[in-house]
Structure formats: structure tokens, C-alpha cells
């Protein structure tokens, strides 16, 4: 369990049906198990006066992120579909940051990459955190080796004291060991994994 205070934000990353539900198009093994952990942490965070922010993968029907359009992923989290909805059991109390909305690629909750210009653009996440005086992040959700990893790396690079909550993450593991390698990488960047 992580510690919370008013200068901490809990980032609940992409706990959406396509990742968390076994019937989702990009279902992550054990993904559904993070919902209960998330609800417990959300409650604890709110009780301590911490901010809770949710990220939501939110793709158009066509995006270079998808295999059929030149990317690597099956179609997932298409705006307005069941797969893009948060898991129905997830307690949603707080701001939601959607990413990929305009067909951008990338995984971090902080930044997206414009596939035409290749430019990296910021999402609303950093300004939401700065406006609240957040200094510390607790990151959990799906998936360890993509959105959790990139969000934690960006958070640390932006100077937030960043923790990844091991109990609340699960990996895609396209290649065996990707999840473990992701955790090694975030640790090397100064992120605490606990
Ligand atoms: C994610 C793969 C593709 C994630 C998003 O949320 O980790 N992974 N899009
Ligand atoms: Zn995606």
C-alpha cells in the first residue's frame, strides 16, 4: 500500500475494458485484478486529501497505433465503444485525461506523438498536477510495459517524486520479460517500485 498526502496524486492508468476485461481486444493477463487494488487505493488517496487522476486510451477508428493502419496493436479503446469504457467496477472520482484522441501515438499520460509531424505534444496531465501543487505521484494500472512505464518515466523526468505500485500493475508481455524489463528501466530512472 502506498502513502498519500495532499501533495500526492494517484494516477490510475488505462483501467479500461479492452485491457482489464478478459474479453477485451488487448486484454492483459490478470488485468481485472487491478480493479480492486485501484478502488482501495482511490479510497485511501481521497481520504488523505490526495488528487486522483485517470488516464484513458481514446483512439479514433483509424490511427497509426493500430496494426491495420501500420502500427503494432489490434484495434482497442476506440472512442465511445465498450472497450474504451473504464471497467464497470472501477470507482471513478476525479479528472480524466484522454490520450490518442486525435490519432496520436504513444503511451505516456503526459505526452503523445503526432504521427504526421513526429512532434511530441503534452496532454493536460502536467498542468492539472501543477495547478494542484502535486509533487509526488503514485502510478498504477495497465499496462506495466507500455502506459505505466512511460507515464512513470515522464513523471520522474518532469521532477515528480514517482512511485509505481507493484500490486496494481500487470504487463502485456508481447515478449516474455517485458514487464520485468520495464520495471528495471523505471527504477534506473529513479522511480520507486513498491
Ligand atoms: C497501452 C498498448 C497500446 C497501455 C495502450 O495502456 O499500456 N498499451 N495502447
Ligand atoms: Zn492504445
Image (tube, grey):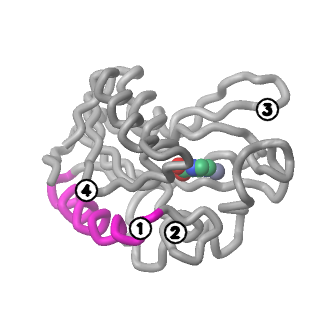
Q: Which of the two discs, 3 and 1, labels the residue nearer the N terminus? A: 1
Q: Which residue is mark 3?
A: 115
Distance (Cα) linking label 4 and label 2 = 19 Å
Confirm if mark 1 falls within 8 A of ligand 1: no
In front here: 99 or 49?
Answer: 99
Q: On residue 86, which mark appears?
A: 2
Q: Which residue is mark 1?
A: 92
Residue at screen point 68% across, 61% down: 76
Q: Which of the two discs, 4 and 2, labels the residue nearer the N terminus? A: 2
Q: Which residue is mark 4?
A: 167
- Secondary element at tag 1: loop
Q: Position of residue 25 (x, y in %)?
A: 65, 67
Up the image or down, 46 lies above or below 17; here it is above
Residue interval drawn in magenta: 29-49
The image quadrant of residue 106 is top right
Image marks 1 and 2: residues in contact by CB distance under 8 Å? yes
Distance (Cα) linking label 4 and label 3 = 34 Å
Amino acid at each position: 500500500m502506498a502513502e498519500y498526502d495532499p501533495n500526492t496524486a494517484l494516477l490510475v492508468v488505462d483501467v479500461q475494458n479492452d485491457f482489464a476485461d478478459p474479453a477485451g481486444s488487448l486484454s492483459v493477463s490478470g488485468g481485472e485484478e487491478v480493479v480492486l487494488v485501484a478502488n482501495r487505493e482511490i479510497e485511501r488517496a481521497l481520504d488523505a486529501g490526495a488528487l486522483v487522476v485517470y488516464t484513458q486510451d481514446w483512439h479514433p477508428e483509424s490511427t497509426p497505433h493500430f496494426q491495420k493502419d501500420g502500427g503494432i496493436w489490434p484495434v482497442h479503446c476506440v472512442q465511445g465503444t465498450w472497450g474504451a469504457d473504464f471497467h464497470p467496477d472501477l470507482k471513478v472520482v476525479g479528472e480524466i485525461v484522454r490520450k490518442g484522441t486525435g490519432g496520436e501515438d504513444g503511451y505516456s499520460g503526459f505526452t503523445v506523438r503526432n504521427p504526421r509531424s513526429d512532434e511530441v505534444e503534452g496532454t493536460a496531465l502536467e498542468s492539472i498536477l501543477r495547478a494542484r501543487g502535486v509533487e509526488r505521484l503514485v502510478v498504477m494500472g495497465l499496462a506495466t510495459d507500455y502506459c505505466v512505464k512511460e507515464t512513470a518515466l515522464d513523471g520522474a523526468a518532469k521532477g515528480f517524486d514517482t512511485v509505481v505500485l507493484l500490486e496494481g500493475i500487470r504487463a502485456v508481455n508481447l515478449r516474455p520479460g517485458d514487464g520485468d524489463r520495464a520495471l528495471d528501466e523505471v527504477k534506473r530512472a529513479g522511480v520507486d517500485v513498491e
